[in-house]
Image (cartoon, rainbow, N blue to C red):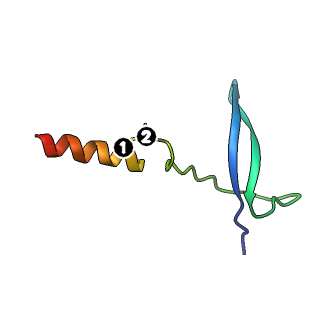
Amino acid sequence: MPEDVVVTLTNPCLDGADLTYSATVLEGKVPDSSGPCSLFIDPIGRPLSPVSVCGVRRRQNRRARR
């Protein structure tokens, strides 16, 4: 069974095709080694994101004014 680990990613750096970043573990434990994994980026808390809570409210307000 895969384990979930919640992290905050900071300091992204793109060098050619390589993307590196710093990660701070918020919940869970990063294993010493692993295989394939998935990264899910949650836009909540990003007020300018079109799918954030604030972004949804901005769209609703714009539509209500029409």
Q: Determine the secondary structure under disc 2.
A: loop
Looking at the image, do the residues carrying marks 2 and 1 touch, with CB atoms under 8 Å apart? Answer: yes
Q: Which mark is residue 22?
A: none
User: What residue do we see at 73% from left, 68% from top?
Assistant: 3
Question: Residue 53 at what x, y percent from top left?
Answer: 40, 50
In this picture, is 56 found above or below 31?
Answer: above
Q: Which residue is mark 1?
A: 55
Q: Decide which of 21, 37 is in the foreground and name it.
A: 21
Question: Residue 59 at what x, y percent from top left?
Answer: 27, 43
> Taking 40 as reference, is 62 left or right?
left
Alpha carbon separation for disc pair 2 and 1: 6 Å
Looking at the rendered structure, the kind of residue marked 1 is Gly
Q: Determine the secondary structure under disc 1.
A: helix
Q: Which residue is mark 2?
A: 49
User: What residue do we see at 68% from left, 29% from top?
Assistant: 17
> Taking 29 as reference, is 8 left or right?
left
